[in-house]
Amino acid sequence: MTHGISYLPHVDQIVVLKEGVISEYGTYDELMRNNGAFAEFLKDQLQERDSDSSGSESGNEGCKISESLDVIEEMGQSAKQFRK
């Protein structure tokens, strides 16, 4: 179990619990492709982090979200290279 999002691409399997029940499981890449609860959670976390760090800058929201999604993609690519 981890609360560190940066570790997730490096683990073998991720199990997602929603209200105490397994809602999905798989590798980081599988869960991101499925666009389920896991992918939504990561997007929400990154959006929240971006809004916390930027204050109320409204013009940059789309750009920051896009950058956050790029970070998620890079994390997945790093994990693939790490596993080889």
Image: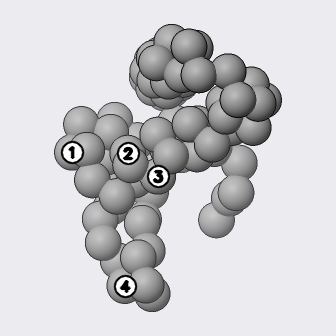
Vertical position of residue 63 compared to residue 52: above or below: above
- Which kind of residue does numbered mark 1 sit on? Asn
Which of disc 4 and disc 2 is earlier in sequence?
A: 4
For the residues labelled 2 and 4, the Cα–Cα distance comes to 17 Å
For the residues labelled 2 and 1, the Cα–Cα distance comes to 8 Å
Check disc 3 and report the residue beneath it. 41
Residue 56 picture quarter: top right
For the residues labelled 1 and 3, the Cα–Cα distance comes to 13 Å
Check disc 4 and report the residue beneath it. 21
Check disc 1 and report the residue beneath it. 34
Q: Where residue 13 sits: x, y (%)?
A: 43, 54
Q: Where residue 78 sits: x, y (%)?
A: 53, 18
Which of disc 1 and disc 2 is earlier in sequence?
A: 1
Query: Secondary structure under badge 2?
Result: helix
Query: Secondary structure under badge 1?
Result: helix
Q: Count residues near mark 4 (Cα–Cα under 10 Å), then give few for <14, some for 14-19, many for 20+.
A: few
Which of disc 1 and disc 4 is earlier in sequence?
A: 4
- Which kind of residue does numbered mark 3 sit on? Phe
Say whether residue 70 is left or right of residue 37. Answer: right
Vertical position of residue 20 compared to residue 52: above or below: below
Q: Is the residue under label 3 in contact with that under label 2 (CB below 8 Å)?
A: yes
For the residues labelled 2 and 3, the Cα–Cα distance comes to 5 Å
On the rendered image, what quadrant is the C terminus found in? top left
Q: Which mark is residue 39?
A: 2
